[in-house]
Every structure is written in structure tokens, then in C-alpha cells.
Image (tube, helix red, strand yellow):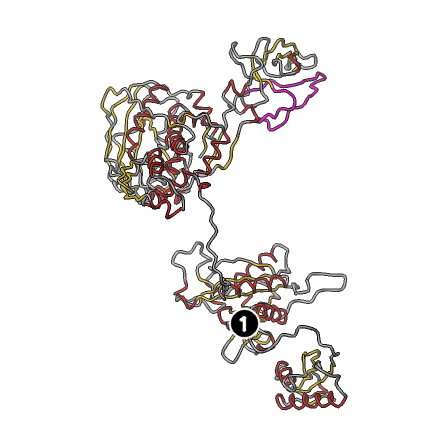
């Protein structure tokens, strides 16, 4: 919502500065978006052309001697080269000195030399000052224009423009008068009385109005004005409309636009000579079309409301008029319409047709129903003042809602809800200045809500009105009460796990993504989803029809989009919900991630050291274990077993368990068939961690004391190579070796895997490194050998492996 300062002062008697007005608007809830103080127009002054001589090198140029007043060039004449055909001695116009910014040219003026003659300024046209599109010559002012005075002040260009961010619940502030009312209530001036002059009505309106869709149009007002002269609107009206971004068209159209922004009352005008028969407000018929004033043809539906005559639809009710009955310069008889429309229907129609107009903006928020007839009178009066003509008596069909809402309001509610101690008399005065009727009895009041405030529904709304006018800054800040005991944790286990998983995965060089919860049906089926219960009844797009059963489809699609644009090596993760059914228990919290191409933990892409290796299942396994560790799951206690869902490669994937039934995560290389179904290319590896399945951390402290310093004795490392069946997992060998002596053995890791004909068919060699960490004394050779025998025995018993010779 835009308006100028002078426009505001038409309704508000105030001496407040622009800064004070802007600050008060924001404090009362009408947040100011921008303020254009029109500083760009201040350098221009009124100047007189003393002489105009022909340019010695150009037939169409003149060399002017210009008197720009005492503030320019010390009062001495200024030489200006000008090509305007109307440049002549004695002309008074707008002068710009070097250094001035010319808004119509988007350039800053400098001293120039034109065809060998120096020019130290510029005489401006209307287009160069954004006053109109005229550029046939420079501005020609009356003889009494004061030389040296500010041209902006003289022409009304110095009027600051304020733009506020209007929230949907404040339709009353969609007009300048409503904004002035709020400022007056806040003590920034006095609201001027609104004088609505009754038009000089001389006959009955010959056009009848029938409302067939009363649920869409409760009331409709119409008046005929004969013998109008539809020329240009007055300069003051054009300036205000231009200032708020509207293009002046003609007096009749400009009047409707002006009243819309001035009083928040949208109107429409029909060329009465183009209307055939009477008007009917009805639902549109399927297949009907309307050629609208924006030059487009719209196909209408039965859910939409139109104003029709014998020719068919003439206007899309409350949104936009039709081109066939639009007013032109030849219009001599005009029908002025002021009506009430269903806000919900206006909003739905505007969205379906993609039309956004000032009328729709106001009607879908709700206009003042009590001002419908008065708004019609006001518009007809303006038509008579600016265009002449004889007016009919208004014809009103239907009746505006007359019932005013009444609210029982205890004044103590203000202190209870806001903590502000507002005296009862002040609260009554604030509500009264806002237009509320207040009948106070003791500590309570019956408050009558004005017709222009459809957003006021209960006691809390009245408290909000008192609070915002009194000032939010008047609320005294108070600290929350603090208990003596130490507070417990605030975040839930799920929140902590989500946060810790995010930090761990980001620390491993992965980028967090946020993907849609909806995926194509084919993608859902590839990941075990696609159930009928999880299909959307009204998807936002045809390829977003199913709730996701996994986070991987969205991440894979994102990685492929990056690859298609030249970024092949990407590592993405997401922590969000998946949907396995339509019950609350079927919604699971999951942390998932993918790595593509060479985006490994230690970096990817080409290097002088050689080509980077492609990612594999072990990269995904490391990511999963790191995230689990961040969530409190110790890696050495987790079991990594074969087997993962069908969307993983069967021989290059696994599941991380904590016991035989508790699956914490799954990881691996994505199956080629899965990638083909998603239209993606590999190599791609991924993992999924089921955060809801992670066990709760122990709340009670254990007897185990943490190690506070490094061991004082040097560790001993020994290597062992075992020949085992090819089906034996490395995890089994590691766990067997660890269990040989848990106090002495600090770590076991695999460092080599070998399979060959020398070992025999179906056999392989696993080489492990065992770290022995003494606690209180150095180990002897006998103790080291004894530990080795225990390791060999334990591995052989658990896996059938023998020590490789």
C-alpha cells in the first residue's frame, strides 16, 4: 500500500515530521517497507531563458543563456546547449545544474561540450523528470513562476511516498483514510471529518440490477451519469496516482483508482451506451469467455461471479472489468458501480485466473460494507465535479449486512495478556479514536466493532488494539522466573540425535540438503513404497504423487541434477522424516546421505597425484558409523552384517545392528536397477540411519572411570594372517581376536585381504594387526607369545581359521 505525505494530510491534521510518521506507522503494526523522500527532484530550479542563439555548428541546436537564480553560478547567467524546438528567449522552465541526477534518463549530468560549445546544465522536459511521456520540448511554465525557486516544490514533485507492508487482517488500512485513523489514534494528529457530498440526482436510474447469486454478492449499487466529458484527470490526481505507481488513463478511470486507494472502496465504471439491457449479477456459465481490460481473454467457470447484460459477461465481479464496456475518450454516459462481493470467491477466482488487481486485493480482505452506498455517492460526485453530467438517483439491489459485532470486554484482560497497566479511561479513549463504540460499566465494557474492522472477533483482538496504539515499547521487559535448582535438559532425545547427526555428517564434508517429502510413484516403488494409503489426494505436481518411504530418492535426484550441470562429485545428507504407512507410528526420523563419483571423505576430483578412486560401500559405512558415534552408539559394540534392502547392491552393502533384532542403519552401493529406475548414473553409495531405533543413553553414571591420561607404557603391535573360508566375515575374525584378552588387547584392525590359487578354492587370507597395551609393567616375550596363542586359538575356534605360514 503506497501513499504520499500530502495525501495522508488530506485526512490527518498533523504537524509531525516524516520520520515521526514513519516510526509511528511501524510501531502501530503498519510496517513501513520503503520511504521515497523525493530527494532526486530537489536539485531542479525554475530558470528563465535570457537569450536563445543558433548553434554555430548545428542547425537544430540553440545556445541558451539561462538565469537560474542566485543559488546557481553565483547568480550569473549559465550557458546551456539545447535541442528543444520550443527553446526561446523569455521561456520559464526547469533547470538542472551539473551534478544533478536526471531520473528520466537515469544519468548524472556533467559539464559537456556539444559540437564545440560548452554546456553547463540542462533545461528539462517532462519525461526527463518523470512527469509524463512528453518529450517534444522543454517544460514551459507560466510567466509568474518564481525564478530560482525549487521546481519540485512548485510542481508538487517533492511529496514523499511511503509504502507499508499491509498484513491480510487489516483491510481498513488498504485506504489512506484508514492509515490516517491509526495515526490519529496513536496521538500523531487529528482525523479530519469525512465529507461525502451527495450528488445532484435528477432522475431515476433506468438500468435495473438483479442479483441471482446472493451468496456471492450481498448488495449492489449503481448510478447513471449522462453527458460526461471524459478527458484527462486533474494534475493533482495524476501526480498522486503516478507517485504510487499507477498510470493515469482518463478522468473516469482515474476517479475509480483514486477512491480505491483513498478510501479503500473499489469501484467500476461502464460505458452506459455499450451496455445492452439490464444488469444481472450471476454465476458464470461453463464455456463463457470475457475479454478483460488487460487485453486478455479469460475462460470462465461456474464457480465465478460475473456482471452480465444481454450481451453476456461484462465484468469479472470485484476483480476486473470487460473491454467491451470499458470507458474511452468518447464515453458520454457512464454507469458507476459500487458493490459487495464474497471475499472467499474473489480470492479463489483471482488465483484460478492468475489475475492480481487493486480491487481484488481489497475485496478478498473485506471492504467496509456500510460504506458501499456512500462510496457510490462519493464517486458520482467526483464524476460530476471533474467530468460534468447529470446523475441519476442510485439503484441499490440487495442490502449490506447491518449487524455490528458486540464484544463483552473486561478491562483487566489488557494487563493479563500483555502485562501493561493501561488505565480504563485511556483504553476507552484508544478504542474510541479507532472507531469502536464503548459502553463501560464498572470494570467491564460492551464494545461495538466498527464495520470496517472484520478482523476483530474477540477480547484478545481488543487487547491487541490497545497494545499497539499504546505502543509495544511501553511493555516493561521482565526476566523469566528462575528456579534455584539446576535445570534438566531441554531438547528431547530425537532433537539431540538429529542435531548430532547433522554435525557429524557436515564435519565429514557432506552438504545438507532439504528435499521434497513427495516423490514420483516409480521412485517410491523402487524403495519399497507406493502404497495406496500414501498417495496424495491433491499433489502439487504430477511427479510428486507419493509420500517418500526413504530419503535416498530425493538425495539421488539432487545429486544427478548437480551432475547434469557439471558438478559430478557431490556428497549430500538430510535429516528428516520418512513415511512407511498412514499411521503416526509409521512416520520415522531418519538421517541419510549419498556420495557420488569420487566425493570421498578425503576429497575427490582429479589431482597431480593421480586419479581419485570412486566411492564404495566402505565410504558409506564410515559415514554411518560416524553419525552413530555422534549419537552415542559405540562402533565396537555394533554388529555389521550382510544383507540390506533390495535398492542396495546385494554383494556391496550391509546392515548395522545392535543385537539380532535391532537394525540401526543400512549402507552400501546403490543397485544399478535402482539407479536406472531413478534416471541416475553411478557410482553412488548411500546410507540410512534410523534415529528412532537408537537406544536411549544411560542416565545413571556407571562405575567405569574414564581414562584421564595417556598410558605410560608403550604399546606392542603384532600381525597375524589367518586362512579362512571365503564366506567368513572380517568382523568375526576381529571380534574373536578382541575376545581373547579384553584387558590386554586394545585394538584389532584388518590390514590385508588376499585370495589366490595357493590358498585353495574357496579360501582367503585375512591379516590383522593386534595392539597390546600393558597397564602397569612392560610385557615380557613370554607374555606376548602367550597372548598370541590365545588370539590364534580364539580365531580358530570362532571361524575355523588357521595361522597362515
Determine the image quadrant of residue 258.
top left
Residue 65's image quarter?
Answer: top right
Residue 163 vertical position relative to residue 564 in the rendered view, above or below: above
The reply to whether residue 110 is in sight is yes
Q: Position of residue 627 (x, y in %)?
A: 58, 67
Does residue 794 lie above or below 663 as drawn? below
Question: At x 23% / y 21%, what residue is drawn?
Answer: 203
On the image, the x and y values in percent for residue 292 come to 38, 35
Q: Residue at x 44, y 56 (%)?
A: 542
| 230 or 466, nearer to the observer | 466
What's drawn in magenta, residue-wise? Answer: 96-125
**Left or right of 633: which side holds 710?**
right
Q: Residue furthest front?
A: 484
Q: Position of residue 564 (x, y in %)?
A: 60, 56
- Residue marked by disc 1: 665
Please identify the quarter of the rendering in which residue 764 is found. bottom right
Q: Position of residue 9 (x, y in %)?
A: 43, 25
Asked which secondary structure carries label 1, the reply is strand
595 and 487: which is toward the camera: 487
Amino acid at each position: 500500500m503506497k501513499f504520499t505525505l500530502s495525501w495522508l494530510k488530506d485526512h490527518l491534521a498533523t504537524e509531525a515530521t516524516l520520520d515521526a510518521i514513519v516510526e509511528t506507522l511501524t510501531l502501530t503494526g503498519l510496517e513501513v517497507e520503503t520511504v521515497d523522500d523525493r530527494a532526486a527532484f530537489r536539485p531542479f530550479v525554475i530558470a528563465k531563458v535570457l537569450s536563445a542563439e543558433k548553434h554555430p555548428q548545428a542547425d537544430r541546436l540553440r545556445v541558451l543563456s539561462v538565469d537560474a537564480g542566485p543559488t546557481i553560478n553565483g547568480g550569473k547567467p549559465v550557458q546551456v546547449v539545447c535541442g528543444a524546438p520550443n527553446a526561446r528567449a523569455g521561456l520559464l522552465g526547469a533547470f538542472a545544474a551539473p551534478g544533478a541526477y536526471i531520473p528520466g534518463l537515469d544519468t548524472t549530468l556533467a559539464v559537456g561540450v556539444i559540437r564545440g560549445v560548452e554546456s553547463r546544465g540542462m533545461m528539462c522536459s517532462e519525461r526527463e523528470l518523470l512527469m509524463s511521456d512528453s518529450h517534444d520540448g522543454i517544460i514551459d511554465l507560466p510567466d509568474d513562476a518564481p525564478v530560482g525557486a525549487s521546481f519540485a516544490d512548485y510542481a508538487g514533485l517533492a511529496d514523499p511516498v511511503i509504502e507499508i507492508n499491509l498484513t491480510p487482517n487489516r483491510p481498513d488500512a488498504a485506504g489512506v483514510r484508514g492509515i490516517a485513523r491509526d495515526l490519529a489514534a496513536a496521538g500523531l494528529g487529528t482525523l479530519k471529518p469525512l465529507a461525502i457530498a451527495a450528488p445532484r440526482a435528477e432522475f431515476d436510474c433506468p438500468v435495473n440490477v438483479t442479483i441471482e447469486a446472493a451468496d456471492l454478492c450481498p448488495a449492489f449499487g449503481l448510478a447513471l451519469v449522462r453527458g460526461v466529458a471524459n478527458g484527462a484527470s486533474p494534475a493533482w490526481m495524476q501526480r498522486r496516482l503516478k507517485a504510487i505507481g499507477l498510470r493515469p488513463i482518463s478522468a473516469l478511470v482515474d476517479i475509480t483508482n483514486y477512491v480505491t486507494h483513498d478510501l479503500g472502496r473499489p469501484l467500476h465504471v461502464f460505458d452506459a451506451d455499450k451496455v445492452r439491457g439490464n444488469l444481472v449479477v450471476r454465476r458464470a456459465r461453463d464455456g463463457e469467455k470475457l475479454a478483460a481490460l488487460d487485453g486478455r481473454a479469460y475462460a470462465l467457470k461456474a464457480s465465478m461471479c460475473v456482471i452480465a447484460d444481454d450481451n453476456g459477461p461484462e465484468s469479472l465481479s470485484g476483480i476486473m472489468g470487460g473491454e467491451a464496456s470499458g470507458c474511452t475518450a468518447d464515453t458520454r454516459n457512464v454507469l458507476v458501480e459500487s458493490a459487495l462481493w464474497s471475499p472467499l470467491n474473489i480470492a479463489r477466482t483471482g488465483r484460478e485466473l492468475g489475475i492480481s488487481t487493486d480491487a481484488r486485493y481489497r475485496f478478498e480482505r473485506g471492504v467496509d460494507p456500510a460504506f458501499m452506498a456512500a462510496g457510490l455517492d462519493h464517486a458520482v460526485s467526483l464524476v460530476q465535479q471533474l467530468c460534468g453530467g447529470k446523475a441519476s438517483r442510485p439503484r441499490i439491489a440487495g442490502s449490506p449486512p447491518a449487524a455490528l459485532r458486540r464484544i463483552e470486554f473486561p478491562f483487566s484482560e489488557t494487563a493479563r495478556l500483555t502485562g501493561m497497566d493501561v488505565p480504563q479511561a485511556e483504553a476507552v479513549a484508544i478504542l474510541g479514536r479507532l472507531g469502536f463504540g464503548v459502553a463501560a460499566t464498572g470494570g467491564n465494557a460492551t464494545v461495538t466493532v466498527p464495520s470496517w474492522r472484520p478482523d476483530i472477533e474477540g477480547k484478545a483482538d481488543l487487547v491487541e488494539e490497545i497494545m499497539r496504539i499504546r505502543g509495544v515499547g511501553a511493555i516493561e521487559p521482565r526476566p523469566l522466573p528462575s528456579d534455584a535448582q539446576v535445570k534438566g535438559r531441554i531438547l528431547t532425545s530425537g532433537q539431540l540425535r538429529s542435531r548430532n547427526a547433522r554435525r557429524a555428517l557436515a564435519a565429514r564434508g557432506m552438504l545438507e540438503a532439504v528435499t521434497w517429502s513427495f516423490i514420483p510413484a516409480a521412485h517410491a516403488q523402487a524403495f519399497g513404497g507406493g502404497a495406496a494409503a500414501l498417495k496424495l489426494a491433491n499433489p502439487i505436481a504430477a511427479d510428486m504423487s507419493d509420500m517418500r518411504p526413504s530419503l535416498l530418492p530425493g538425495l539421488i535426484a539432487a545429486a544427478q541434477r548437480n551432475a547434469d550441470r557439471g558438478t559430478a562429485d557431490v556428497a549430500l545428507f538430510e535429516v528428516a522424516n520418512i513415511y512407511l504407512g498412514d499411521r503416526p507410528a509409521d512416520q520415522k526420523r531418519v538421517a541419510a546421505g549419498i556420495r557420488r563419483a569420487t566425493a570421498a571423505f578425503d576429497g575427490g576430483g582429479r589431482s597431480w597425484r593421480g586419479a581419485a578412486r570412486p566411492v564404495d560401500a566402505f565410504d558409506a559405512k564410515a559415514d554411518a558409523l560416524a553419525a552413530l558415534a555422534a549419537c552415542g552408539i559405540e562402533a565396537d559394540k555394533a554388529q555389521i552384517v550382510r544383507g540390506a534392502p533390495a535398492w542396495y547392491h546385494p554383494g556391496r552393502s550391509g546392515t548395522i545392528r545392535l543385537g539380532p533384532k535391532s537394525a540401526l542403519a543400512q549402507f552400501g552401493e546403490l543397485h544399478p536397477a535402482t539407479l536406472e529406475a531413478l534416471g541416475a548414473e553411478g557410482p553412488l553409495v548411500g546410507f540410512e540411519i534410523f534415529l528412532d531405533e537408537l537406544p536411549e543413553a544411560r542416565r545413571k553414571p556407571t562405575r567405569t572411570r574414564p581414562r584421564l591420561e595417556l598410558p605410560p607404557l608403550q604399546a606392542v603391535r603384532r600381525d597375524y594372517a589367518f586362512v579362512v573360508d571365503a564366506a567368513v566375515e572380517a568382523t568375526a575374525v576381529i571380534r574373536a581376536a578382541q575376545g581373547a584378552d579384553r584387558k590386554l588387547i586394545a585394538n584389532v584392525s584388518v590390514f590385508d585381504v588376499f585370495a589366490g590359487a595357493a590358498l585353495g578354492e574357496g579360501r582367503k587370507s585375512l591379516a590383522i594387526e593386534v595392539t597390546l597395551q600393558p597397564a602397569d609393567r612392560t610385557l615380557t616375550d613370554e607374555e606376548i607369545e602367550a597372548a598370541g596363542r590365545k588370539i590364534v586359538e580364539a580365531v580358530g575356534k570362532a571361524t575355523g581359521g588357521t595361522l597362515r605360514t
